[in-house]
Image: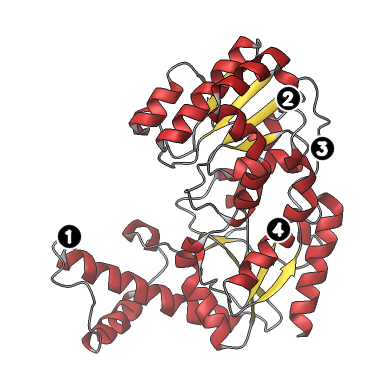
Amino acid sequence: MTSLEGTATNLVGDRRLAECDVLQGMQHFPSLAVLSFRGSTHWTRVGRALKLRRYTVLKGIGHPHLSRVYLEVLFLLQAIRYDLAQAWVESLPKEHVWLSDFDRSAYCRPLIWQAKKLARTTATMVHGTPNQNYLPPVAENVLVWGEAQLQWFRAVNQDCTLHVVGRPDICKFIAPGPPKRLRVVHSMESLMETEKEALARLCSMARSWGLDVSLRLHPSVTRSDLDENWKTAAAALAFENKSENFLASLAPGDVVVGINSTAIIDALIIGVPAWTLADAMRELPCDLSKLRDASGPLLVVLSQPEQGAAVRLAGPDMLRYSRSLGLGPALVAATGAESEELLRRAVGNMLRD
């Protein structure tokens, strides 16, 4: 939003779930929760939804894990959301560009569907590293970070127009200093045995070098939610304050490792040495898949005890000189002001097409 300064913008969200700092000026559009519809609808809309229900066959009825009442309520709420979307999209100028977050397509679908129906411009923003779970994109345009995401979307033959815009949210760069802290980032994945062993060995080596070693949990996870392999890996680690902004917390001397977390890419782009310890059999999102290839030397070291011993004697500097550092331009085409200009240009091109 801030990257489009000078352009008329509206932030849409469920006010009941939004953070306080974005509530001012935000347009409310309810999510699929009854409490979110308070003040957003009226009996006429409910009546239209009930009428539509008469002509609709609900899939899932009879499924042992789905309540009939739940399905009926879900249908009514979604029907009202589409009704609200129709009225709202029609009321706004044709020049509006409707932007959807790539992992919030279910929430945005009524708005994007109506916008496309009225031949309005729609686009999907990518704020993480995409995988098959986020296909197909809900909008007709996709704003990607760099060449890696561009080639990935082309390879999966998605019927959308791609625009490379980089990362306007990144405005800092860190010159990596001598390693001081190994930061393990968690992303709700279940650890494979090979990953657990590699992580344990790396953390042990880091501690023997005198590095601080910490674990940053995914924001939606608590310690008790970790699976057994993660609990084993985390037993000797200090837990970070996960409410702190990760990008802002990165500092010279940090080294970031993980399996499936976008935070690994974030660290790499601003100059912090970063690796993925993902097993070769794990399916990774496109950016992390490229990074796994560059992380090969470290994975080899951690899988062979005799080489591990040699590197342990060499000290922590081996973590600084990662071939993955050269991947930055392929993963993210631009950052900061340069990326903001690419984004504005992409929006302009979408409006002209």
Q: Earlier in the sequence, mark 1 or mark 3?
A: 1
Specify few, some or many for label 1: CA neighbours under 10 Å numbering under 14, 14-19, or 20 or more: few
Task: Name the amino acid type tagged 3.
Answer: Phe
Assign a secondary structure to mark 3.
Answer: loop
Q: Which mark is residue 65?
A: 1
SS under mark 1? loop
Q: Which of the two discs, 1 and 2, labels the residue nearer the N terminus?
A: 1
Local secondary structure at mark 4: loop
Q: Residue at x 51, y 80 (%)?
A: 113
Determine whether 44 is above or below 22 in the image: below
Which residue lies under the disc numbered 3? 173
Verify CB contact (< 8 Å) between mark 1 and mark 3.
no
Per the image, the residue denoted by label 4 is 1
N-term-proximal mark, 1 vs 4:
4
Q: Position of residue 330 (x, y in %)?
A: 76, 55
Location of residue 57 (image quadrant): bottom left
Instruction: Report the disc number at residue 318.
Output: 2
Residue type indicated by callout 1: His
Apparent side of residue 49 relative to residue 122 in the rendered image (left or right): left
Q: Is residue 336 above or below residue 321?
A: below
- Comes first in the chain, label 4 or label 3: 4
